[in-house]
Image: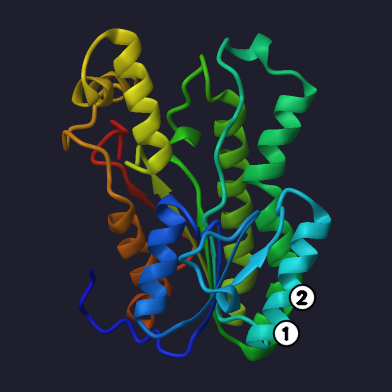
Amino acid sequence: MMTMDLALQGRRVLITAGTKGVGKAVFTLFRDNGARVLTTARSRPAEVPEAQFVAADLTSVEGCNTVVDAVNARLGGVDIIVHVLGGSSAPGGGFAALGEEEWQRELSLNLMPAVRLDRALLPAMLVQGEGVIIHVTSIQHELPLPESTTAYAAAKAALSTYSKSLSKEVTPKGVRVVRVSPGWIETEASVALAERLATQAGTDYEGGKQIIMDSLGGIPLGRPAKPQEVANLIAFLASPLAASISGTEYVIDGGTVPTA
């Protein structure tokens, strides 16, 4: 747990995909620091209070509109938006395995929810003259894996470029826009992947983790990041402690990307 005072008490915060993995860690950290938090996913787990949750499919226009309505009705607007939503279900097999549906699915999940929610919520942030938007991208937009992540990496690259352009437009008006670019994170989904690879290779969980790290070209730190570590970075960047930071991308990957 981060112990420094982040001055987040009473801040109105929207966190997408806040029920699992990094999103859950971000949701918990902001809540524990006194923020007024609303999160969203397709269904609510029992541990997330109903008052802090809105059920919506953010890959659709209607789902994004549902979240915007909930933010305005329950929070009266927003001070901080953290776009954690993302992922990939595209098959392996390189470019030839990616048809129209796969490309649309990756863009609908990894780019368009952030675009739609920003478009709806940012005008009020500009009126109040302050706010923070954090887009969670991925090192895959710099280090794509051609066998399996081409469409995901391209969608995250689009999100990163969109974020940079947005920051140049709105930072002079008081709204900071920052990107956080994680490498491999030890979430529930990645644990399941490592276990599956371990079973296929006839090894244990640590062996499965090593298979993933090898596929990334190695992680100098020797392990994936923890969700809480990524959440700590996001909370700092969203706080007044980072008041002069905007337009930049912060990589948290244990040294995976081999260039600065």
**Residue 244 placement: quadrant:** bottom left
**Quadrant placement of the N terminus:** bottom left
Residue type beneath disc 2 = Asp
Position in image of residue 209 (x %, y %): 26, 26
**Quadrant placement of the C terminus:** top left
* Label of residue 69 in the image: 2
Position in image of residue 93 (x %, y %): 57, 10
Front-most of residues 55 and 136? 55
Is 18 drawn above or below residue 144 in the view shown? below
Residue type beneath disc 1 = Ala
- How many labels were placed on the picture? 2
Tell me the CA gap for discs 2 and 1. 6 Å
User: Can you name the residue that lies furthest to the right here?
Assistant: 62
Position in image of residue 163 (x %, y %): 58, 56
**Residue 91 placement: quadrant:** top right
**Residue 152 placement: quadrant:** top right
Q: Residues within 10 Å of mark 1 (few under 14, many from 20)?
A: few
Is 10 drawn above or below residue 71 in the view shown? below
Front-most of residues 47 and 171? 47
Residue at 35%, 10% (x, y): give it.
200
The residue that mark 1 highlights is 73
Q: Secondary structure at mark 2?
A: helix
Residue at 70%, 88% (x, y): give it.
127
Front-most of residues 95 and 58? 58
Asked whether the residues under the numbered discs 2 and 1 touch, taking CB atoms below 8 Å apart as contact, a structural biologist would say yes
Q: Secondary structure at mark 1?
A: helix
Residue at 36%, 39% (x, y): give it.
183
